[in-house]
Amino acid sequence: MKINFSLLCAVLMVPMIFFVPILYTQAFPKQQTEKHLVEMILALLIGILCWLFFGYFESFQVGTQNTLPVISRSFGPTMFVQLDFFLYALVMFTGTAIAKHS
């Protein structure tokens, strides 16, 4: 039951992550909308890579000092929920920072 709830939360967060940049476009001047959407999507892609290569290993304490970190069996619903909430916070911060400086 816990895994099903985690998967449901992760699936419900995905549309929210990608609709927030669309909502922020209303705060941008019309001429700069596409540029700012690209910036937010690029921030999301960089955030995904950073979380997978650094955040995942820190949050799950995978690997030791003598070995390279390897994604283990904990790569599951809990990981996706944490990644989704990280990306949601990232897109909210990025959108706010871009809107403030536009």
Image (spheres, rainbow, N blue to C red):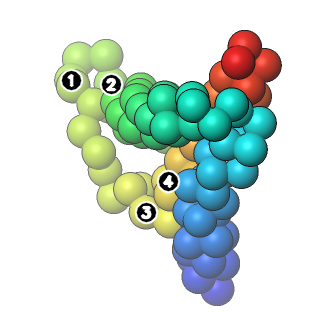
Residue at 73% x, 26% y: name it.
Answer: 99
Q: Position of residue 31 (x, y in %)?
A: 57, 31
Q: Tell me: residue 19, above or below residue 97.
A: below
Which element carries disc 2, helix, strand or loop? loop
Q: Which residue is mark 3?
A: 76
Q: Whole-Å distance between the Cαs marked 4 and 3?
A: 5 Å
Asked whether disc 2 touches disc 1, contact meaning CB atoms under 8 Å apart, the reply is yes
User: Mark 3: which amino acid?
Assistant: Gly
User: Mark 1: which amino acid?
Assistant: Thr
Q: Earlier in the sequence, mark 4 or mark 2?
A: 2
Q: Whole-Å distance between the Cαs marked 2 and 1?
A: 5 Å
Q: Residues within 10 Å of mark 3 (few under 14, many from 20)?
A: few
For the C terminus, give its image quadrant.
top right
Is residue 74 at all visible to an observer of this figure?
Answer: yes
Which element carries disc 1, helix, strand or loop? loop
| Residue at the limit of the structure toward the bottom, as seen here | 1
Q: Whole-Å distance between the Cαs marked 1 and 3?
A: 22 Å
Asked whether disc 4 touches disc 3, contact meaning CB atoms under 8 Å apart, the reply is yes
Residue 79's label in the rendered image is 4
Quadrant of the rendered image containing residue 42: top left
Residue at 56% x, 55% y: name it.
Answer: 18
Q: Nearer the viewer, residue 56 or 10?
A: 10
Residue 64's label in the rendered image is 2
Q: Whole-Å distance between the Cαs marked 4 and 1?
A: 21 Å
Q: Position of residue 80 (x, y in %)?
A: 50, 57
User: Mark 4: which amino acid?
Assistant: Met
Q: Residues within 10 Å of mark 1 (few under 14, many from 20)?
A: few
Q: Which residue is mark 1?
A: 67
Q: Nearer the viewer, residue 30 or 84?
A: 30
